Image (cartoon, helix red, strand yellow):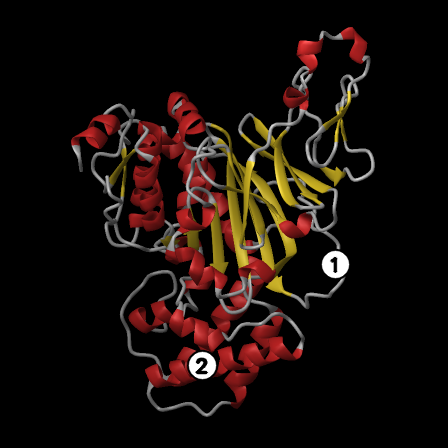
Amino acid sequence: MDKVVENLLRTVPFRVTNPERIPVQRYYDEEFYKLEGEHVWARVWQMACRLEEIPQVGDWVEYQILDKSVIVVRTKTGIKAFHNACRHRGVQVASGRGNCKTQGFVCPFHGWRYNMDGENTFVFGRQLFSEECLEKGELNLPPCRVELWGGSAFINFDDDAAPVRECFGPTAEKLEVRNIDKLKVDAWFSTVLPVNWKLATEAFQEGYHVMRTHPQLHAVLPSDLHVYGVDMGNSPTMTRPLTPKEYIDAAVGMLAEVADGMGGMVTPKEVAIAQRLRDEMALPADTGAAAMAFYTRLREEITADGLARGVPMFDVNKVAVTHPAATVEYLFPNYFLLPMFSAMISYRIRPLSPETCLFEICALSLHPENEERKPPIAPVPMAPDDPRFPRIPSQDNVNFPLMRRGVHAKGFEYMRLSKDVEGLISNYQRLIDGYIAGVESHKLTKASQVVCGSLDTPIRDIGF
């Protein structure tokens, strides 16, 4: 690390100096939270909306992050974004969602108007103002930087940040080849969690917690069963290798659990195909060969089924070989995509206060491109224990209030990380330090490319 960067990092409170230990104050300290708002959220790419939320010219949605509000609108010339404050006295001109093609945006306070391109079109009582107050170039809504990727609009308050695709690095390609830009929302859930946004984020950056938090899933995970054996229950104990039939039964059970418990990461059609193959396939005598044969055939039939239904399908087998992806792929700072076969789940986590955050889940799948669909609408947040919330992340929700109390416990000073499977937590936390310290933009971009990626990664050198 060069001396300039080292000196900058020394200014960060509660800095991560040992990559295997994260100072606990980072999860509740108000000053650190403010620094994140000033230096992280002000400079990073944030998924503001899915493009299918604004399918028609004039459609718009509001995106909120901390004390900022942005309007994302589909215009005649493409997607644009504007800072959501009337040029008169700063009142928000739009809240929620709507269509501005006919009336434009109308300030609810004094009636000033703006068209979909952010241009001021009406000032009530213009004669009451001096000419210098109504300079034309100063009356339009200030644009906010927006770029499109993965079927979504991403905004950034930093006009000098590297392009969104560059910041996501190689992980973006792993998702692009899975036609992420063609996915559509099947279901959308949200809840307010009683923890700092980073505690929520870190719950999905490692699979180490599955054994205890999701025992019903752990019991049917083929990878775990291969290591621990069949009769392990909640306590992993070595027994014996799996037979081909036991392995395939476990694999199909896992797919059914994920389809039910995640609300869409695996589609019902994919589960039905897996169940049919389980019953009709002749399996090799070797368990490893049986697993390979089963998944190859399953991916082949999922591809064929998608093509037959007229969806913009990719070759699932080919992509699994050329661009293998984990079941959880992380995009710094707060967005996750969870691919399995042809569908995905997305997670978005936004800070609300030092110890609360908004957690959203979207179930995404491929649909025929000419299919008529209603635009998805952001749901009203439900309680974390609402039975309508997907079952597997609901089990994570149970842990969050316990974590909030735990980080305040006397004598608890650090999160102690596994260097082998909890490295993603360390990697992104150190990138946060880089933003707060004011490390050069090109170094932050390179670090982001290292940080973005799969869960269960080791601690890595991010460049500073």
Task: Provide the residue designation for mark 1.
Answer: 373
Q: Is residue 223 above or below residue 242?
A: above
Q: Position of residue 76 (x, y in %)?
A: 72, 46
Residue 78 in the figure: left or right of residue 161: right
Secondary structure of the residue carrying tag 2 is helix
At label 2, which amino acid type do we have?
Thr
Quadrant location, the C terminus: top left
Q: Quarter of the image holding residue 385? A: top right
Front of the two marks 1 and 2: 1
* Disc 1 packing (10 Å; few <14; some 14–19; many ≥20): few
Query: Residue at 61% of width from left, 70% of height from top?
Result: 312
Mark 1 or mark 2: whose residue is earlier in sequence: 2
Q: Nearer the viewer, residue 416 or 170?
A: 170
Q: Is residue 47 left or right of residue 44?
A: right
- For the residue pair 53 and 270, the one nearer the viewer reads as 53
Residue at 30% x, 50% y: name it: 422
Q: Nearer the viewer, residue 410 or 169?
A: 169
Q: Where, quadrant-wise, is the N terminus in this rendering?
A: top left
Q: Position of residue 289 (x, y in %)?
A: 35, 85
Q: Residue at x 41, y 32 (%)?
A: 40
Q: Is residue 429 left or right of residue 399?
A: left
Q: Is residue 58 above or below residue 130?
A: below
Say if residue 388 shows up in the picture: no
The residue drawn where x is 35% and y is 43% is: 445
Residue 322 can be seen, yes or no: yes
Q: Which mark is residue 296?
A: 2
Residue type pointed to by label 1: Arg
Residue 331 rendering spot, x and y as whole percentages:
43, 49
